[in-house]
Image (cartoon, helix red, strand yellow):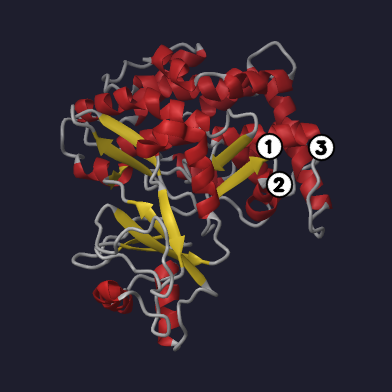
Amino acid sequence: MNPLLSLEAFKMQTGGRIVGEGIDGCVFAEPAWPCEGSKDYQHIPLSRDGRYVSKIVPMSDTEDEYLRAAEHLLGPLASTFIAKLEGSCAPANSKNPPKLADKGAFMASRSSLAAWTEKDQACESLKQTLKEGKTISEGTHKIYFIQRYPITVGEWLTLHKNDPYKLIIRQIVHATPVFLTGLQKFYQNLNEQVFHIDLHVGNLFIRTQADKSLQLGVSDFGHCLLNNQVSNELPKYLTEYIQRYEFYSGYSQVPLEARLLNYCYQKKLDGADPRTLVTTWQNDREISMKIVGSKDTLLVNLYWYLKTLLEKPLFLEMVTELQSLCKTLRAHADKPVLILSKKQSFILQFILSRYLSFSPINALVEGMMGLKAEKPFQKEVEQIAIQVLGYQQRLTLAPDTGIKPFIRFLSRLLCVPYIQKVPLEQALKTVMEADMSHLFLESV
């Protein structure tokens, strides 16, 4: 399983100071792990300030760059749409202790880390560092102080799983247009884009407003790609993700085009007929097994989606472009810099934009399908897709759960680039520039 794209489950420790971890960072709160005390850091909150968490990461971590770029792109919306970066510093340790006021926080954080029992993530690595007599120091690690958000979408849905499901779904429907408006700000700016490629329900959060309405937001920018006039990290997606890992078919946060690209590279199908590549992936044993009981809209409706797409010349042309990316990646596997053509760069940019339009809504739907309804959601989800795609219904209609706007949106968004009568690049550009909130409201 790919550890970089794994669901970084928020592991809660009752009565402890560690509130979460992923593959990259260990998160402390109330009190936070403090800064070393010899310097005066600006914009660093008090370690006991419950509005913030401290996240210890390796010095090489670049999440702070992504958070700053995201804040710039979002403008005023950043204050509620992301968990903003407040500042960073060198971590306190035994050789470089914290300020006297933070001594208790330092001792409490060390004790919590020593008692941590979860394996194979960032906190265990820090714990092992201390056990070996080494220090968490300025040379090896740094601390981010990040705004604390109330609750992840995954946690919120679990908390409300026994509540009236139609009310829960309706609340999320109302929050989705503004959510999509925020997401598209990450990739529609001509001068700078930040592509977050891990938007599962553990990295989406919910705030409850004063009027009881919900606001959706985005957290954990550890797995992002930055593209601006100074830095173009987009080829890293090919070299550090597509090339290194075989994607697990259960990741609802991975869009269709990315799944096909990864399968093509990992199975060495660069030279196959495009239609053969798609059907081979569709009939792969892992995919076939995962479809049974899946809550991933893409897999639930895979037969109908591919039945439609394989009839569209633009989709087959897109698959050919995915194969071209695989060939280029394979040819440059041993070279330090991957050089892409202008067209390949644009195709890659489109694929990454799907992580910020299709994928978060697909992850939301997967979470909502875990709510307790009278009957499983899958039948209704399939029937809605059949209706959107224009096929004839042969079964009694499933009960209306309220999930229809999401399935309409996903089905239209998946297919709309490939049903146009224009050149492929123009079709993709039109979708990338589209107002996603408007498309969703048309689906309500």
Q: Is residue 152 above or below residue 343?
A: below
* 55 or 154: nearer the viewer: 55
| Residue at the image point whose x is 41% and y is 83% from the top | 130
Secondary structure beneath disc 1? helix
Looking at the image, do the residues carrying marks 1 and 2 touch, with CB atoms under 8 Å apart?
Answer: yes
The residue singled out by tag 3 in the image is: 341
Q: Are marks 2 and 3 in contact (CB under 8 Å)?
A: no
Residue at 30 percent of width and 23 percent of height: 174
Q: Amino acid at mark 3?
A: Ser
Q: For residue 440, what is the image quadrant?
A: top left
Label 3: how many Cα within 10 Å (few below 14, some 14–19, many 20+): few
Q: Which residue is mark 2?
A: 235
Residue 309, placed above or below residue 364: above
Q: Residue at x 68, y 37 (%)?
A: 348
Rendered view: 131 above or below 105: below
Q: Quadrant of the C terminus?
A: top left
Residue 357 visible to an observer of this rendering: no
The residue that mark 1 highlights is 348
- The residue type indicated by label 1 comes to Leu
Q: Position of residue 19 (x, y in %)?
A: 30, 61
First in residue order: circle 1 vs circle 3: 3
